[in-house]
Image (spheres, helix red, strand yellow):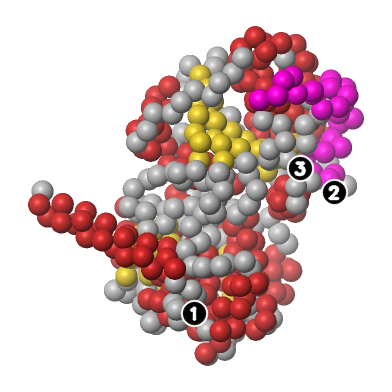
Amino acid sequence: MAAAEEHDSSTEAVQTAAEEEEAKTFKDLGVTDVLCEACDQLGWAKPTKIQIEAIPLALQGRDIIGLAETGSGKTGAFALPILNALLETPQRLFALVLTPTRELAFQISEQFEALGSSIGVQCAVIVGGIDSMSQSLALAKKPHIVIATPGRLIDHLENTKGFNLRALKYLVMDEADRILNMDFETEVDKILKVIPRDRKTFLFSATMTKKVQKLQRAALKNPVKCAVSSKYQTVEKLQQYYLFIPSKFKDTYLVYILNELAGNSFMIFCSTCNNTQRTALLLRNLGFTAIPLHGQMSQSKRLGSLNKFKAKARSILLATDVASRGLDIPHVDVVVNFDIPTHSKDYIHRVGRTARAGRSGKAITFVTQYDVELFQRIEHLIGKKLPVFPTQDEEVMMLTERVNEAQRFARMELREHGEKKKRKREDAGDDDDTEGAMGVRNKVAGGKMKKRKGR
């Protein structure tokens, strides 16, 4: 017991020290001038806690295990030391970054290119859903940094002539817990067998699972652990609520909330691709600018959805958990858990999409009669009881008829779209998976539903 208390106090001391060091600059951490200037241009005024802990150790050549919550600046914590080392010893195929999702791979590539723009850094993104031949051509040019999902990388290692990673100097596994949860263990083992043992390895993860510990033992040499969040927690400026509602009225309550909080940007999380698509169609039929993001969309459409939302051309992004982690979308005001997450930890990642970088934000979780146990687990995990989001039930029920009609149109459109896909696998002319789909658009609303009252 005493040992445990001593460990806790030492952890607190480390955290306090990190807080005291927060005033440090990137230059203080040992980052070279040209990269410090790049940080300034990106608006990174000062390093985050994980960057303060990890960067100096990485620059000393140590292997790193970084444990940090979502939105903590992990990409900068591994990108800056890698670019620093690349400047000292320029080399092609210098670093490999493994990520669980395609969107995260593109985002990491953007950050590497932005930080390394003045020194001519070239990146290749190697993920599924994109033509293999164009990726083979990109690899033939021998980029400095390869950012990949494990499955597609193995495909190129086995089938792309002349491509290998035998000269690799850095390996990064980002969101390692999620890479392993998605059953990429076999692929990761294969990759570890074909890259040099004499390399630097950075393993970043939000959680330390048994699988991550096993991977750590297999892949890292005498690593330093940098943990800036010792327990699950959500950001202080995040206002969290729940709504207990009958399952059959979920759509109606969603429309009510979108009206009540009109003028905000929303991320709405659904549990399946089909429900994401259905809800996007429903909202569009009611005149909302909603756009879907899920795993059954083609890669170009997924990126299109994300870019439209980032550019504020759409105010509502409906997503499966493909978008719950790692994606940096700076202006999300409200997160709605339309379907409660099955894994409590996913709640942390979903609500982490808002209240980022010191801003405030709201998260509202729908709890039906079937979700009570899952909701209690979430409250237990975050260590707090959530308040009810205030609603006027009579006003909600006034929306029922129009929502029912929109549901009917959405079901028709989904059915038509399914038949259309059978006839022709992909309609290349579509703007996205729902836009311009079926010609039934806006028959219900004829325009955005009027906000019934000010808040």
Mark 2 vs 1, N-terminal side: 1
Instruction: Give the extent of the magenta segment.
Output: 430-455
Question: Considering only order in the chain, which callout, 3 or 1, is on the residue closer to the N terminus?
Answer: 1
Q: Mark 2 — residue?
A: 428
Q: Residue 10 at what x, y percent from top left?
A: 22, 60
Would residue 38 appear left or right of 212 to someone viewing this image? Answer: right
Residue 290 in the image: above or below residue 303: above
- Amino acid marked by disc 3: Arg
What residue is shown at x 85% (from left), y 44% (from top)? 430
Distance from Cα at disc 2 to Cα at disc 3: 21 Å
Disc 1 element: loop
Residue found 50% across the figure and 75% down from its top: 26
Find residue 224 and report its horizontal and vertical position in percent. Answer: 32, 70
Foreground mark, 1 or 3, reads 1
Q: Please state which amino acid type lies under the numbered disc 2.
A: Ala
Q: Residue at x 54, y 35 (%)?
A: 363
Dot 2 alpha-carbon crowd within 10 angstroms: few under 14, some 14 to 19, many 20 or more: few
State the SS at label 2: loop
Instruction: From the top left corner, tell me how far across and down residue 28 is, in percent.
Output: 45, 78
Instruction: Give the secondary structure at mark 3.
Output: loop
Q: CA distance from mark 1 to mark 3?
A: 38 Å
Question: Is the stretch drawn in magenta largely helix, strand or loop?
Answer: loop
Instruction: Give x and y (percent) for residue 288.
Output: 77, 31
Q: Nearer the viewer, residue 416 or 452?
A: 452
Residue under pointer 3:
314
Q: Foreground residue, 345 or 115?
A: 115
Label pair 2/1, CB-CB below 8 angstroms:
no
| Amino acid type for the residue under numbered disc 1 | Lys
What residue is disc 1 on? 27
Res 433 quadrant in image: top right
> In the rendered view, would you say 37 is above or below 235?
below
